[in-house]
């Protein structure tokens, strides 16, 4: 067999396994899981899209490839796999009106076509009346879906966990009970998926736990009790030394569990009340933070994390200023980026040492921010609530490359794939590309 023929056979075999693509501009042999935004914090679960090259500038009349209306209400980030976009939403009876307790809703998983925004399928997974309301800025569909390319998983809190095939057929579902959230602020965490295990956190004002399911069958693999007030942070799976750690943020503790068994591996002192931002990790380090009624950032070195984590025993460094309330951090090219509370005041730390590269830098274009920062192709994208966005150059100094505006409001985080950005506004989904 010639070298050319052998190469073609290898590429064909990898394509059959979903490991290569043929889309123009995307290198062969790029794994799908590295290319597509298949979970709410992206391919690496850090906010980075390592293969994407999105546009620099856009506006209502510039680089909006399409814009489609999304039924109901939701703040979840779109996820993308190959030619399909998936969103979660909650549709009040009659299809319109504000989300509120006391009215019947449909909890829906929606799939759109990447090329033109048309609806490919719509699946109602639950119909009922919410037992409590949400925060004024919240919705009943704030958690994002996740996919492994074979199945789609959606967590609607008190409405259940649902697994669907890529055509929208429900394969299994699990009911976990009824959450009672702090101040009736509602539910919003997303599920975490690693290998064949789906992890859901259930911290509320009742009995707390973190639970893992076999992603193919829905069989419960393990469940661990917790003692936390309501948290909204999505679990993060960090790997080191052949072991996967399920990292779960909390007000009382920051905890790491063994993905396979659920065994508690380590525990550090907790973060602030209303823990919302999701952790990130790279190079054997985990970073967790929150910023409501206080400031807390902890960097945990997994190689040394056993039992109680403290300075000199797994806790590499801490930081106690300007941490975020709602937006999650971005970990990109050795920098840890985060916003102060829900504002456009940005800090970047050296991820290894915790030393500031810059801090308290005010981004004039984005005064208020709920969406989490994302990055690709040497750029950082931060989307404000009032429709303005800022694009920065990644690096040790702050450099604004562009500011952009759309006539909409944005709380959901952006998703980056190939040369495209997807933005979910209050009532519309946008594809931003040339």
Image (cartoon, helix red, strand yellow):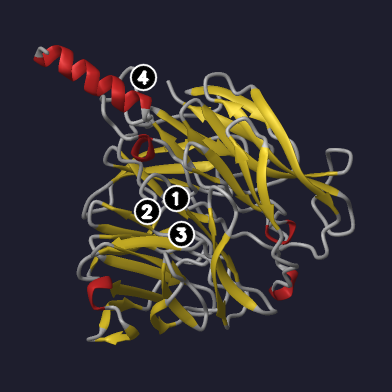
Q: Earlier in the sequence, mark 4 or mark 2?
A: 4
| Discs 3, 1 touching: Cβ within 8 Å | yes
Residue at (69, 64) in percent of width and height: 176
The residue that disc 2 covers is 46
Q: CA distance from mark 2 to mark 1?
A: 6 Å
Instruction: Tell me the element at label 2.
Output: loop
Comparing labels 4 and 3, the label whose residue is closer to the camera: 4
Crowding at label 3, few (<14), some or many (≥20) Cα neighbours within 10 Å? many
The C terminus is located in which quarter? top left
Residue at (89, 58) in percent of width and height: 102
Q: Earlier in the sequence, mark 2 or mark 3?
A: 2
Which numbered marker is on residue 23? 4
| Discs 4, 2 touching: Cβ within 8 Å | no
The residue that disc 1 covers is 41
Instruction: Tell me the element at label 3.
Output: loop
- Quarter occupied by residue 160: bottom right
Comparing labels 3 and 1, the label whose residue is closer to the camera: 1
Question: Residue 294's x, y, as percent?
Answer: 48, 80
Residue in front for this viewpoint, 66 or 106: 106
Question: Residue 87's x, y, as percent?
Answer: 61, 40
Q: Quick check: can you spot residue 15?
A: yes
| Discs 1, 4 touching: Cβ within 8 Å | no
Q: CA distance from mark 4 to mark 2?
A: 25 Å
Crowding at label 1, few (<14), some or many (≥20) Cα neighbours within 10 Å? many
Comparing labels 1 and 4, the label whose residue is closer to the camera: 4
The residue that disc 3 covers is 328
């Amino acid at each position: 067999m010639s070298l050319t023929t052998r190469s073609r056979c290898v590429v064909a075999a990898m394509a059959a396994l979903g490991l290569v693509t043929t889309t123009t501009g995307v290198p062969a042999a790029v794994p799908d899981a590295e290319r597509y935004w298949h979970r709410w914090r992206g391919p690496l679960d850090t906010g980075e899209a390592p293969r994407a090259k999105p546009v620099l500038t856009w506006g209502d009349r510039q680089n909006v490839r399409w814009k489609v209306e999304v039924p109901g209400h939701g703040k979840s980030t779109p996820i993308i796999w190959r030619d399909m976009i998936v969103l979660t939403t909650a549709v009040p009876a009659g299809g319109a009106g504000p989300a509120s307790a006391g009215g019947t809703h449909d909890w829906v998983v929606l799939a759109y076509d990447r090329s033109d925004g048309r609806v490919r399928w719509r699946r109602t997974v639950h119909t009922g009346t919410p037992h409590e309301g949400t925060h004024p800025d919240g919705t009943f569909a704030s958690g994002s879906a996740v996919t492994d390319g074979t199945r789609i998983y959606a967590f609607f809190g008190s409405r259940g966990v649902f697994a669907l095939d890529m055509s929208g057929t429900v394969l299994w579902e699990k009911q976990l009970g009824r959450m009672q959230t702090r101040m009736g602020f509602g539910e919003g965490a997303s599920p975490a998926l690693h290998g064949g295990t789906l992890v859901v956190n259930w911290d509320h004002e009742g009995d707390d736990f973190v639970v893992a399911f076999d992603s193919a069958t829905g069989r419960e693999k393990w469940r661990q009790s917790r003692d936390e007030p309501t948290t909204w942070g999505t679990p993060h799976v960090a790997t080191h030394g052949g072991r996967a750690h399920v990292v779960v943020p909390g007000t009382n503790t920051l905890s790491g569990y063994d993905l396979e068994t659920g065994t508690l591996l380590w525990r550090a002192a907790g973060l602030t009340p209303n823990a919302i931002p999701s952790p990130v990790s790279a190079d054997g380090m985990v970073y967790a933070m929150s910023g409501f009624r206080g400031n807390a950032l902890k960097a945990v070195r997994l190689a040394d994390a056993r039992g109680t984590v403290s300075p000199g025993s797994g806790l590499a460094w801490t930081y106690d200023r300007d941490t975020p309330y709602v937006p999650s951090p971005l970990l990109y090219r050795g920098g840890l980026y985060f916003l102060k509370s829900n504002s456009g005041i940005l800090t970047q730390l050296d991820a290894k040492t915790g030393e500031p590269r810059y801090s308290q830098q005010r981004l004039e274009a984005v005064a208020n921010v709920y969406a989490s920062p994302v990055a690709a192709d040497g750029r950082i994208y931060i989307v404000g609530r009032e429709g303005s966005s800022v694009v920065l150059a990644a690096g040790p100094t702050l450099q604004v490359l562009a500011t952009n505006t759309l006539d909409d409001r944005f709380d959901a985080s952006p998703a980056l794939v190939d040369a495209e950005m997807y933005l979910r506004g209050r009532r519309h989904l946008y594809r931003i590309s040339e």
